[in-house]
Image: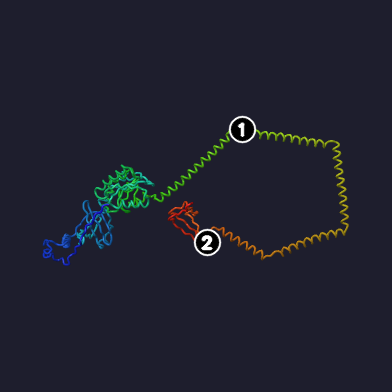
């Protein structure tokens, strides 16, 4: 960038008594013309002459505007501009709020500021006339371009991953430097091609169009940024030129319009594929994927690719094993063995079926023979005699039992003895049960039992505390988790990650600034 040295100025002090302009003696001593006057005297005389002209009514368009206690602005027409000032008393009486581009009528008197010699109009009143000529032309141009569809073409999305960015702007301003610094900070892998162009003055539109056409002809960029830094309303007018707006709309490469600052609006903003508030904001857009994010994408893709390769390899290994198994299953030897096994199985099933049939027929024959033997005369007589003898024996036994029972009931001593025996047996069983309970009660030491149970409970508590993963924190250790509350793997942790360290009494959240991995022997 070329820098122009500023000229040095020497302040000239005003005369203490400027009422007399007769300085012939002083000028004579200094060797100058006897008719020469000082700068202060010249400005004072000129300012007096301007005031003698009185007030003038001037019509023009507001081009620059700064409102403090006083109102400072410029008023211009097609070929000239003049600085104006309206003091606070007159400014507060205005019935409207002045704006840049507004056409107004002012009443004021000319004045020259003594310290700088700058000419200004001291405005005492201001009236609205309507929208300024330039603003009106811009409004009509915008409506015509909108009607023709220049602004309504399909907006192309800005690529997420960008290799090369073309910047169409002045090479002498800070725009290129700001864009370079922003992109260097966010993603230094993006290349920048600068297409220099004038961004101010009458030649600016043609220069910008030539740079835009050159960028499209070379076709080296993924996206173009066209714009400039902040400036006055007139400074930004080249970016509302009709030919430039149409060239931006017809560009084959996506364009980001970044003209001025946030409130500034140019017609290229409507024709471009995207508008950025400032050139720096445009640089942030084209580096939406930062260097850290890109490294993360590459790492994620590498991990996913490895997983896919191993999964595919396992898939083909499984298919190969299945093919080997099918090949072995389809061999002639296995086929013959399978048929042989089926034949042996059928023979075994046939033998079992034949043997079952023979057994069933033999059993059926035995049953038939047994049933037939029951109908033989000798067998029938034998069966009847057996039944008769059984019934006689049962009758004799019943008679004997009845006689014995009657005798026992008649024997009183026997009955008393039997009841005494039963009572002694019951008393003995209760006595034995009482002895056992007394022995158990004597052998049961309650205090010792409670002490034993308390000791066992303490031992169990100590074991449980030893198994508690948080118990180790009380010894000065900590447990580290990642953002998903999973145990940190040193192989996966990287700079910039957020980790949580669990200690006794709380948790510490920290950011990884450097990772040291143990080296294996």
Q: Residue at x 61, y 61 (%)?
A: 459
Left or right? Give the position of 71 relative to 476.
left
The answer to whether one can see residue 413 in this image is yes
Q: Mark 2 highlights which residue?
A: 475
Q: Mark 1 highlights which residue?
A: 336
Height in image: 518 above or below 90? above
Check contact, mark 1 vs mark 2: CB within 8 A.
Answer: no
Q: Secondary structure at mark 2?
A: helix
- Residue 349 at x, y percent in the picture: 68, 35
Given residues 297 and 367, the one toward you in this image is 297
Q: Secondary structure at mark 1?
A: helix
Given residues 510 and 384, the one toward you in this image is 510
Q: Residue at x 65, y 33 (%)?
A: 343
Left or right? Give the position of 51 relative to 460.
left
How many numbered discs sit on the rendered protein? 2
Left or right? Give the position of 437 relative to 151.
right
Residue sitting farthest toward the front: 521
Residue sitting farthest toward the bottom: 17
Given residues 228 and 163, the one toward you in this image is 163
**Mark 2 Cα shell of 10 Å, populated few (<14), some (14-19), many (≥20):** few
The answer to whether one can see residue 109 in this image is no
Instruction: Using the rendered view, name the quadrant where residue 111 is placed.
Output: bottom left
Query: Which label was assigned to residue 320?
Result: none
- Residue 23 at x, y percent in the picture: 12, 64
Q: Residue at x 48, y 45 (%)?
A: 307
- Residue 114 at x, y percent in the picture: 20, 62
């Amino acid at each position: 960038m070329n820098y122009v040295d500023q000229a040095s100025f020497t302040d000239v002090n005003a005369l203490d008594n400027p009422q007399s302009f007769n300085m012939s003696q002083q000028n004579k001593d200094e060797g100058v013309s006897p008719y020469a006057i000082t700068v202060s005297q010249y400005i004072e005389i000129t300012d007096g002459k301007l005031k003698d002209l009185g007030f003038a009514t001037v019509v023009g368009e507001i081009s620059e505007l700064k409102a403090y206690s006083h109102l400072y602005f410029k008023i211009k027409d097609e070929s000239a501009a003049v600085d104006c000032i309206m003091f606070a008393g007159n400014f507060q009486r205005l019935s409207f709020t002045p704006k840049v581009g507004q056409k107004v009528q002012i009443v004021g008197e000319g004045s020259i500021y003594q310290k700088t010699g700058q000419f200004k109009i001291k405005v005492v009143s201001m009236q609205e006339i309507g929208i300024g000529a330039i603003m009106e032309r811009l409004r009509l141009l915008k409506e015509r371009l909108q009607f023709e569809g220049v602004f309504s073409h399909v907006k192309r999305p800005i690529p997420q991953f960008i290799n090369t960015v073309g910047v169409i702007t002045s090479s002498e301003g800070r725009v290129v430097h700001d864009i370079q610094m922003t992109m260097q900070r966010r993603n230094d892998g993006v290349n920048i091609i600068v297409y220099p162009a004038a961004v101010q003055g009458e030649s600016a539109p043609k220069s910008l169009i030539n740079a835009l056409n050159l960028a499209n002809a070379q076709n080296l960029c993924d996206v173009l940024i066209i714009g400039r830094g902040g400036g006055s309303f007139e400074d930004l007018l080249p970016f509302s030129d009709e030919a430039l707006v149409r060239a931006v709309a017809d560009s084959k490469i996506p364009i980001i319009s970044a003209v001025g600052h946030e409130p500034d609006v140019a017609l290229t903003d409507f024709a471009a594929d995207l508008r950025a508030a400032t050139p720096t904001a445009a640089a942030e857009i084209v580096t939406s994927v930062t260097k850290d994010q890109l490294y993360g994408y590459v790492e994620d893709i590498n991990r996913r690719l490895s997983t896919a390769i191993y999964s595919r390899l396992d898939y083909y290994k499984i298919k190969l094993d299945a093919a080997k198994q099918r090949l072995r299953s389809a061999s002639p030897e296995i086929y013959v063995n399978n048929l042989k096994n089926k034949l042996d199985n059928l023979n075994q099933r046939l033998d079992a079926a034949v043997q079952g049939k023979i057994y069933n027929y033999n059993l059926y024959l035995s049953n038939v023979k047994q049933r037939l033997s029951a109908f033989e005369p000798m067998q029938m007589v034998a069966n009847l005699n057996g039944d008769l003898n059984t019934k006689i024996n049962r009758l004799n036994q019943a008679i004997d039992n009845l006689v014995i029972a009657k005798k026992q009931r008649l024997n009183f001593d026997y009955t008393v003895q039997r009841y005494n025996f039963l009572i002694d047996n019951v008393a003995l069983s209760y006595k034995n049960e009482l002895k056992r309970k007394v022995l158990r009660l004597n052998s049961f030491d309650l205090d010792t039992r409670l002490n034993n149970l308390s000791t066992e409970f303490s031992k169990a508590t100590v074991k449980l505390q030893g198994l508690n993963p948080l118990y180790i924190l009380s010894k000065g250790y900590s447990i580290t988790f990642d953002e998903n509350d999973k145990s940190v793997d040193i192989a996966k942790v990287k700079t910039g990650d957020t980790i949580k360290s669990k200690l006794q009494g709380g948790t510490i959240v920290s950011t990884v600034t450097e990772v040291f991995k143990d080296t294996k022997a």
